[in-house]
Image: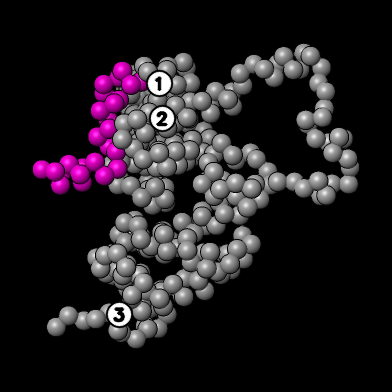
């Protein structure tokens, strides 16, 4: 006789702290299909538990407990959470990232999706005119006059603008070859941020290859994640160092290669297109 989970009484909330029980519940809700989260009483209890669990974290970001619960809900529906050795670690990291983006977006008056992007990392919170005692004319850059020689220097391409253009071109390459734009953008931005911290492409590659949090954030398979690292940062083996595969597309774009030239690289195009998330699954279904 099939058990009706929807009619079962709420389990004690302490059960949700057990990784095995949580993993089993998430898998059951996933297998039940659309609407399972709305009908299942244990799912209701889980959401209440999540709201309480992350209430303090939400307050830290000037948000409410159910804002954190909503972020956790999105994380709990991913494959990474269902198959993780420690689902709570994956969920907690996702909630931290989401709440941080929400707080930053509120301060910058933009969407959370924009706040996640590395290109906006240097932007500060919006400043109201009443926040300053001095006149707007005294401090706002728009009302300052610079000498002509400084203005001329400012018109020259900066390193930051070149890096931004290279990152945008890298994202464009992935999207043209079948990768979803949000996954490509978030993945490339994340790789670039870790590259800046690591100091070298090889060190960044090794750290990112083992970074399960990044894969959970993107919700992609390990093969797709590894392929993205190889394409962006280059193959880490020393004997490939001077080859196109060893340099990676980020270096190639920074030294002057165009997106058109990269798309003419058959090996590169094949590697990116075959590693697109979901491609292997679709191929298997079609066969």
**Residue 205 occupies which quadrant of the picture?**
top left
Image location (x, y in percent) of residue 199: 51, 33
Does residue 92 appear anywhere in the picture?
Answer: no
Q: Nearer the viewer, residue 236 or 216?
A: 216
**Residue at coordinates 69% horizontally, 19% vertically from top-left?**
154
Earlier residue among tags 1 and 2: 2
Question: What kind of element bears circle 1?
Answer: helix
Label 1 belongs to which residue?
A: 259
Residues shaded magenta: 262-287
Residue 122 visible to the viewer:
yes
Circle 3 is placed at which residue position?
6
C-alpha separation, residue under disc 1 versus residue under disc 2: 8 Å
User: Residue at horizontal 31%, vertical 31%?
Assistant: 177
Which of the two labelled residues, at mark 3 and mark 2, occupies the earlier sequence position?
3
**Sequence-first tag of 3 and 1:** 3
The picture places residue 133, in percent across and down from the top left corner, at 88, 46
Residue 172's tag is: 2
Local packing at callout 2 (Cα closer than 10 Å; few below 14, some 14-19, many 20+) is: some
Residue 1 lies in the magenta stretch: no
Callouts 1 and 2 close, C-beta under 8 Å = yes
Examine the image and state in which quarter residue 75 appears.
bottom left
Q: Report how far apart the C-alphas of labels 3 and 2 lie in the structure.
A: 45 Å
Q: Does the magenta stretch include residue 286?
A: yes
Q: What element carries label 3?
A: helix
* Category of crowding for the residue at label 3, using alpha-carbon neighbours closer than 10 angstroms: few (below 14), some (14–19), many (at least 20): some
């Amino acid at each position: 006789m099939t058990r009706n989970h929807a009619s079962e009484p709420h389990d004690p909330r302490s059960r949700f702290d057990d990784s095995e029980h949580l993993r089993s519940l998430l898998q059951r809700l996933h297998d039940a299909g659309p609407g399972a989260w709305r009908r299942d009483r244990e799912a209701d209890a889980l959401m209440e538990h999540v709201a309480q669990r992350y209430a303090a974290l939400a307050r830290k970001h000037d948000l409410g407990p159910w804002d954190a619960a909503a972020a956790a809900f999105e994380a709990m529906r991913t494959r990474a959470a269902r198959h993780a050795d420690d689902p709570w670690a994956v969920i907690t990291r996702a909630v931290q990232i989401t709440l941080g983006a929400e707080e930053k977006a509120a301060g910058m008056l933009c969407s959370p999706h924009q706040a996640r992007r590395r290109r906006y990392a240097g932007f500060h919170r919006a400043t109201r005119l009443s926040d300053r005692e001095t006149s707007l004319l005294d401090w706002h850059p728009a009302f300052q006059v610079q000498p002509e020689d400084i203005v001329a220097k400012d018109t020259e391409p900066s390193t930051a603008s070149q890096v931004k253009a290279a990152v945008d071109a890298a994202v464009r390459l992935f999207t043209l070859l079948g990768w979803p734009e949000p996954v490509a953008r978030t993945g490339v931005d994340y790789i670039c941020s870790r590259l800046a911290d690591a100091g070298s492409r090889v060190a960044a590659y090794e750290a990112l290859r083992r970074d399960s949090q990044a894969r959970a954030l993107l919700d992609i398979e390990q093969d797709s994640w590894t392929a993205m690292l190889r394409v962006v940062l280059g193959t880490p083996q020393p004997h490939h160092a001077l080859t196109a595969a060893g340099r990676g597309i980020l270096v190639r774009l920074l030294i002057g290669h165009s997106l058109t030239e990269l798309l003419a690289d058959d090996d590169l195009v094949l590697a990116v297109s075959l590693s697109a998330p979901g491609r292997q699954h679709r191929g298997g279904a079609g066969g």
